[in-house]
Amino acid sequence: MKYNVITGDTMKESLIDRIFALDMKVYGAIDESFVGTKQNMIDRFRHNPRTFVCLTHGDKLVGYVNFFPVKDRLFDQILGPVKFVPGDTEDVSDGHYEELTDPQEILAHYNRYRDEGEAASDLNEVIEYYNTCRDDDIAPDEILKEYSRKREENNLFIISIVIDPDFRGREASTQLADAFIDYLNKLEEQGTPINSLSAVCISPDGEKFLRGLNFYRHRLLPAAEETAYHERVYLCWGHYLNRLLEKRMYHKTFRDDIYLFVPFADNPENDKLDALLNNHSDNYHFSKTDDPIYVNETSEVPRKTKRLLGNLDSCLEYEYEGFRNNELDRVYLGRCLFRHTTDRYENETVGEEYADLLLLSYRSAHMYVLVFYLPNCRYSSSMVGDQLSQMKLEARYGGPDTYGFTHYRNIISYLEDKYGLVRCGRGKAFYCMDKLPRKQVGGVTPDTDADTTSGFSQEFLNILSGETYFSIHQDFYIRGCAKLTEQCTTNRAIYDYYQAYMSEVSLVMVLNTYEDDGDDHIEAAGADISRYRNTGDNNDLGFQKLEDVATYVFIVELILLQNTALAKLSQKVGLALEREGNVSYEYINQVYRDYGRTLKLWDSKNFKYVGTSMEAEQIRDALENDELRTRYQEEQEFLERVVDVNSASDERRNGWILGIVGTILALVQLKDYIVSIIAVFFTGLGNLTRHPESIIADESTFDNVFNIIVWGGLALFTIICICNRNRKRYERKRNLHSRERRDDE
């Protein structure tokens, strides 16, 4: 379809009538209060006409973007009370915005933009000011009449992005975005470069459009009393803006459910898990109403997640026989708002999405597997994998604060503090897709045949390698790895209803039939978490997909238990080696007992079906569990040798001690004979000096001389041994530090 572009440079004022009519059609369908006033739009256009990019098809207005450079005072109100924190380099893009929290700092920040006599002393006035959504009430005098030659003054606020519902689709939105970017580049060429873009969004479609333009979510504004919509402030600047101007943007070309597996262990003395594992019903209910990391209002498990849990238990019961009844236990921890971010990992949130937390417990072995279940992930799958690689798995902690800023907590550290769980081994990702990612020519990176001759996309390669495809701070991509190329092109599926591709960190299943589960999966949009609802769970569509996936996920869980066991044992062996093998035989026996509990996990005969056993072998091979097992056995053998050497050394030392003790006892037995020799020596010495009166020849004197010789010699020997041992330790530490310095250099 052929589209025409009209910008504010050549746009006639009469076009505003059609723009206003389109606003009525789109915004009016949501809420009439979202429709502005035509005269306000005209006044702003007359003040600065270079603030529109419109898309037409014949005489039909398809869509438009309305934006303008705002003055500092309005830009500050949009951002909220924040300060700019420079990065480690001179590049401004390396910095980030940080929320102000001290009331006096907030008041001072607010007053810096006030004229004399307007300064505020009441914090409530400041709160109301920053929580006011500026939209159609923006006056012409709050806008720059001309774009500035100084980059830092050109902060564009997008007041409206609209596409006619009759033209909704990839083509129209892409054309409008391209036209808008071209206009921004035109401003750059004219010597008026753009410093930042900001926008306030009120709909999921608007959010999707902004995310496609490299915007990230900055803060939330309170919802109006008459509506449930929560305005969200989005921002694009620095690295994000640079990539936008280069038209390097990410568009997801596939659908997927994501499962993140994180292995844990705990101490046998840990009692923090008792309440969690002992007080849930067969329906996996567990109340989290008082916990700020979860958003469920009740302890009920969402229907779809409950179906997944039931399918996992069924697979374990009917396809595996290695465990006794109730030896493995599943617990539904609750639903959280998972934070999607970029690989800058600063205060920049791309968006939020519901994630259900499921815990598989092997309590007798003190091993656990936590599963993050993200159905219908709307965001970059490779970035989720990158977050797993970095263990930056965060969830919103409570609701937004006074100024709409959301705060997050790392779920790994949260579980460690709350339940005494300690991460044990590397996390793994499992993606259930409807199709493989397509090549994106002109997207984030050109995926041409010269780049990937085997037909797979760069994004798919990044998913398997656990790296983000859309990096903010780097411009290079992983290429030319024969092992990864083989992993991207080798279908390791055992059955015919799916394709399977595997690496040591990621597993990808592409289902031949990928039904839409019908879950609206609403995005967190408001300031009040009590507004969140589990929608779509009464729909039976897509449950076949859950059954297909469960046959694979339960195998991954078992393999992860193997992985956890090896990591746990390796940590124990490593700790013993750090102590130079100076551990008790009870410690060694405990290591052996822990290893014995895991042997059942390695027996492929526990799988009742050959095909399932073959799937397990494929997954175990991909995750390199056999290599981990071999390495552990080598470490264990090395520890045994160290313990044997230490034991031999202890035996020699004990022999020396026994020899010394025996010598001392022998000397004590010969005391009378030795004392008589000492008496003769001293008497002879007195006669030789011709002063026999100087020699005290009573028996007690000779006894004291004997005691001094024996016990003084023993003390001197002990001191020499201690000094020699400390000298050897000091030399070992000095040599170790010397090697570390050489390695650093």
Image (cartoon, rainbow, N blue to C red):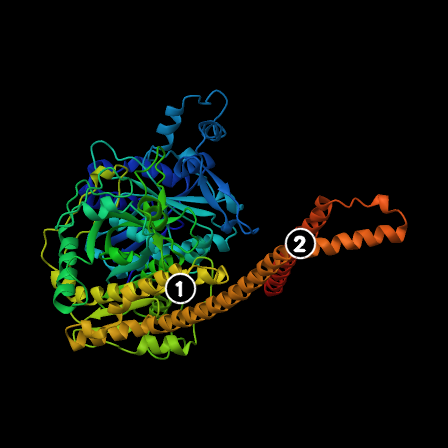
Image mark for residue 354: none
Q: Give the number of marks.
A: 2
Say which of 250 and 468 sits in front: 468
User: Which badge, 2 or 1, is on the more N-terminal residue?
Assistant: 1
> Residue lying furthest right in this view?
690
Residue pictured at 50% horizontal, 51% vertical? 94
- Residue 721: quarter of image: bottom right
Q: Judge depth for marks 2 and 1 and give the one in front.
A: 2
Which percent across, then down, holds residue 65?
Answer: 33, 49
- Name which residue type carries label 1: Ser
Picture quarter with the N terminus = bottom left
Say which of 171 and 16 sits in front: 171
For mark 1, give the secondary structure: helix
Say which of 141 and 99 sits in front: 99
For mark 2, give the secondary structure: helix
Question: Can residue 100 be seen in the rendering of this structure?
Answer: yes
Task: List the residue tagged with mark 1.
Answer: 570
Q: Is residue 435 above or below residue 68?
A: below
**Structural distance between the alpha carbons of marks 2 and 1:** 60 Å
Q: Is residue 135 above or below residue 280?
A: above
Task: List the residue tagged with mark 2.
Answer: 672
Q: Are marks 2 and 1 in contact (CB under 8 Å)?
A: no
Which percent across, then down, holds residue 526?
Answer: 26, 40
- Name which residue type carries label 2: Asp
Question: Can residue 248 be seen in the rendering of this structure?
Answer: no
